[in-house]
Image (cartoon, helix red, strand yellow):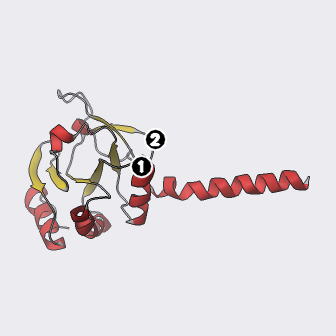
Amino acid sequence: MKRLALAISILLSLQMGAAPTQAATTSCVHITLASSNTGKSAILLPCLDGKSTVDFNAIRGPVVVNVWGSWCEPCNQELPYFVKLQATGKVQIVGVDVEERNRKSAQNFVLKKSMKWPNLYDENSITRSLFGLGVPVTWFIDADGRVIYKNIGVMKSQKELFSKVKKYLGIAA
């Protein structure tokens, strides 16, 4: 009986140790998607929560899409501005992680950096032709799914990011 209790205790502690990464990785079910075929070829990306796949071409806004990699120093520099934008609750953010070593590294980075918005995982570089070779890249997408503005390179300040959200999406953050 003691062995059974010990085994159950160990099993529970192992499960509890794995839970924070999954729980802290925000689900993609709340991403606004087109209700019908967009007419574009699907670009299917798994969500870092491991529970869903999203067609990137079906994303509708207003939304700020930030393309990043944990290995990218400029991405790390601008990340606090996105965390502050998300905290306002005024605009949807979707991240796209590219060229990451593996899903677990991406999940750990999201958890460590308090990225509480949905993040997609491009494990096979299928978005390279869409976003280009370098990161960070930030797109501003309207309610019709049109890319209103593409920011190539790092956001240099919170003011710059918030200003672009206002200018291109009409949302004062």
At x 29% / y 52%, what residue is drawn? 95
Residue at the location (24% across, 62% down)?
A: 75
Residue behind mark 1: 27
Q: Where is mark 2, residue-wise?
A: 51
Tell me the amino acid under the disc marked 1: Ser
Q: Earlier in the sequence, mark 2 or mark 1?
A: 1
Q: Position of residue 5 (x, y in %)?
A: 84, 55
**Residue 132 lies in what quarter of the image?**
top left
Q: Residues within 10 Å of mark 2 (few under 14, many from 20)?
A: few
Q: Place residue 153 in its image quadrant.
A: bottom left
| Residue 118 x %, y % | 35, 51
**Residue name at image x 46 percent, y 41 percent:** 51
Quick check: marks 2 and 1 in contact, CB under 8 Å? yes
Disc sitting over residue 19 in the figure:
none
Is residue 54 placed above or below 12 in the rendered structure?
Answer: above
In screen coordinates, is 141 left or right of 86?
A: left
Q: Is residue 144 visible?
A: no
Q: Nearer the viewer, residue 143 or 107?
A: 107
